[in-house]
Amino acid sequence: MEILVIGGTGTVGTHAVRGLVERGESPKVMTREPGKAGVDGAEYVEGGLGDGDAIRAALEGVEAVLLITPLHPQEGDLGVAAVKAMDDAGIERLVFQSIHRVQEIPDPPHFASKIRIEEEIVSTGIPHTVIAPNNFFQNDLWLREPIVEHGVYSQPFGNTGLSRVDARDVADAHVRALLDLPAEGLAYPIVGPDVWTAEETAEAWGRHLDREVIYGGDDLDAYAEQAGRMMPGWLVEDLVEMYAAFQERGLVASEEELSLSRAVVDHAPRTFDDFAAETAARWSS
Ligand SMILES: NC(=O)c1ccc[n+]([C@@H]2O[C@H](COP(=O)([O-])OP(=O)(O)OC[C@H]3O[C@@H](n4cnc5c(N)ncnc54)[C@H](OP(=O)(O)O)[C@@H]3O)[C@@H](O)[C@H]2O)c1
């Protein structure tokens, strides 16, 4: 099958492209930097989501698309425009990466964008599947310095709990949705096997790194001040809104969602403890 991956050089997309190649596919990957190292067996073509001509060119001869939209102030507009181009190109199957239970947390802008893009997909009638992951374990890779150097876990998602998931399981779900599952317009939650609070997460990092790691706390003003040194203001505001919702209501999968996720991924879910152990070993070496 001729497959185009948009967002195929990122955290999830890289694994999805590798998974497709391992299944014998030769996916096309649209990237703004085609020269950067990629997965052998994939074809990298130049283009960004804001470039309609590049998207139309990339869609030529393509039957199925995996769409992973970036965190971007115009994410909704970019995603909607890409979906319209897919509709014009007669795409037969679309897999879109959304967010677990996004309808229940509609306000953070990158959540609202997912809802808009999903609505656009439905309105086109393109046969599709929505893959809706919980918070990625791999977000913690950005926190190496505060964790390792300062013993502080600084993702302020609170202590209600999240069914955090390994991005590699999300990628496995994308491959299954592209190659194995019927595109019936369903949304599949992709979730981890355990519920993690931020305090438990800090404790797990401490255990695997053999040092004390404490949770930095729920103060979102302090988080915004720190994060604002590294991220643009629009992204800080978006993430503060998301973390406020996580602190208040959590994002915990039901037993039914967990078994559905497991069926889609088609193997036992990877655990945070294993992820933290392998990451801590790498950070310590
Ligand atoms: N992090 C989480 O816990 C989590 C959980 C659920 C859902 N999500 C959603 O997952 C998505 C991000 O996935 P990810 O973390 O795998 O991606 P990522 O690592 O942030 O990578 C972003 C990808 O988007 C591409 N990209 C960035 N800016 C672009 C632009 N202007 N035009 C076109 N492409 C652009 C990049 O390609 P090039 O740079 O090569 O062009 C790259 O492939 C977001 O929509 C996020 O809301 C995240």
Image (cartoon, rainbow, N blue to C red):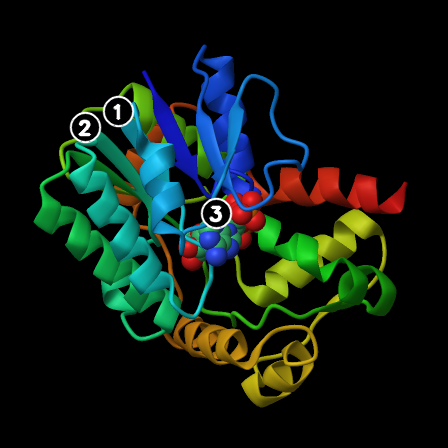
- The image quadrant of residue 36 is top right
N-terminal-most mark, 3 or 1:
1
User: Which disc, if any, is residue 194?
Assistant: 3
| Dot 3 crowding, Cα within 10 Å, few <14, some 14–19, many 20+ | some
- Labelled disc at residue 63: 1
Residue type pointed to by label 3: Asp
The single residue placed furthest to the bottom in the displayed view is 221
Numbered disc in front, either 3 or 2 = 2
Q: Position of residue 158 (x, y in %)?
A: 52, 72
Give the alpha-carbon distance from disc 3 to disc 1, as whole Å.
Answer: 36 Å
Q: Which mark is residue 92?
A: 2
Q: Mark 3 to mark 2: distance in Å? A: 36 Å
At 82% from the left and 64% from the top, the residue drawn is: 212
Q: Is mark 1 within 8 Å of ligand 1?
A: no
x then y, percent, for residue 100: 33, 53
The quadrant in which the C terminus is found is: top right
Name which residue type carries label 1: Glu
Tag 1–tag 2 contact (CB < 8 Å): yes
Mark 2 surroundings within 10 Å by alpha-carbon count, few (fewer than 14), some (14 through 19), many (20 or more):
some
